């Protein structure tokens, strides 16, 4: 199984550069499913929010789509899917939701935090 970085995933999702998007699509076609690390996913969400102006509903829809896709496999797939689901109604950001779900998945909860919104997540503890 091959892995991709943020730049390749962004090209696949946005099609903002036709030449690079074609290369990314060809790589996906030849190597699917592609493995996506948690770091790449977090960076992708950040880039889509800050540089492309995607809002939370669009990002939630994207997360649901790609976590259920046969084209991608995520490091800690269940935690990523749970974080996406939790983020729908959470005031906390996606990264906070993901951190709580990763801690739970690895038996390391509660996740201690000073962040008030993150502390409201089940599995988090406000210090």
Image (cartoon, grey):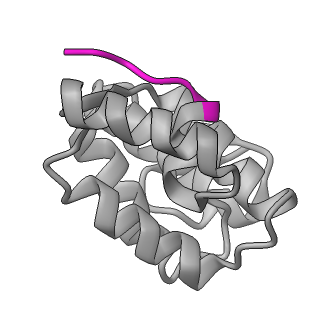
**43 above or below 46?**
above
Point out the image quarter for the C terminus.
top right
Q: Please, which residue is most extreme toward the front here?
A: 19
Magenta residues: mostly which secondary structure? loop
Q: Is 49 displayed left or right of 11 in the figure?
A: right
Residue placed most toward the observer, 37 or 31: 31
Q: Is 21 displayed left or right of 34 in the figure?
A: right
Q: Is 60 displayed left or right of 112 in the figure?
A: left
Residue 77 falls in image quadrant? top left
Q: What are the residue bounds of the magenta stretch?
A: 1-7
x then y, percent, for residue 115: 78, 53
What residue is rendered at 69% in x and 50% in y?
A: 17
What residue is rendered at 52% in x and 40% in y?
A: 9
Point out the image quarter for the N terminus.
top left
- Magenta segment includes 68: no
What residue is rendered at 48% in x and 73% in y?
A: 60
How many marks the image carries: the answer is 0
- Residue 10 visible in image: no
**126 above or below 6?**
below
x then y, percent, for residue 120: 59, 67
What residue is rendered at 43% in x and 50% in y?
A: 123
Residue placed most toward the observer, 88 or 4: 4
**52 above or below 100?**
below
Residue placed most toward the observer, 96 or 4: 4
x then y, percent, for residue 114: 80, 46
**80 above or below 93?**
above
x then y, percent, for residue 38: 48, 30
- Residue 6 visible in image: yes
């Amino acid at each position: 199984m091959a892995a991709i970085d943020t730049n390749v995933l962004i090209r696949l999702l946005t099609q903002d550069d036709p030449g690079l998007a074609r290369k990314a699509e060809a790589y996906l076609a030849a190597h699917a499913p592609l493995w996506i690390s948690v770091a790449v996913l977090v960076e992708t969400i950040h880039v889509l929010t800050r540089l492309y102006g995607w809002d939370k509903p669009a990002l939630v829809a994207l997360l649901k789509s790609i976590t259920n896709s046969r084209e991608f496999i995520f490091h800690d797939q269940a935690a990523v899917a749970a974080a996406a689901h939790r983020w729908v109604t959470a005031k906390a950001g996606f990264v906070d939701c993901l951190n709580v779900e990763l801690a739970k998945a690895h038996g390391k909860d509660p996740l201690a935090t000073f962040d008030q919104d993150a502390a409201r997540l089940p599995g988090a503890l406000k210090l």
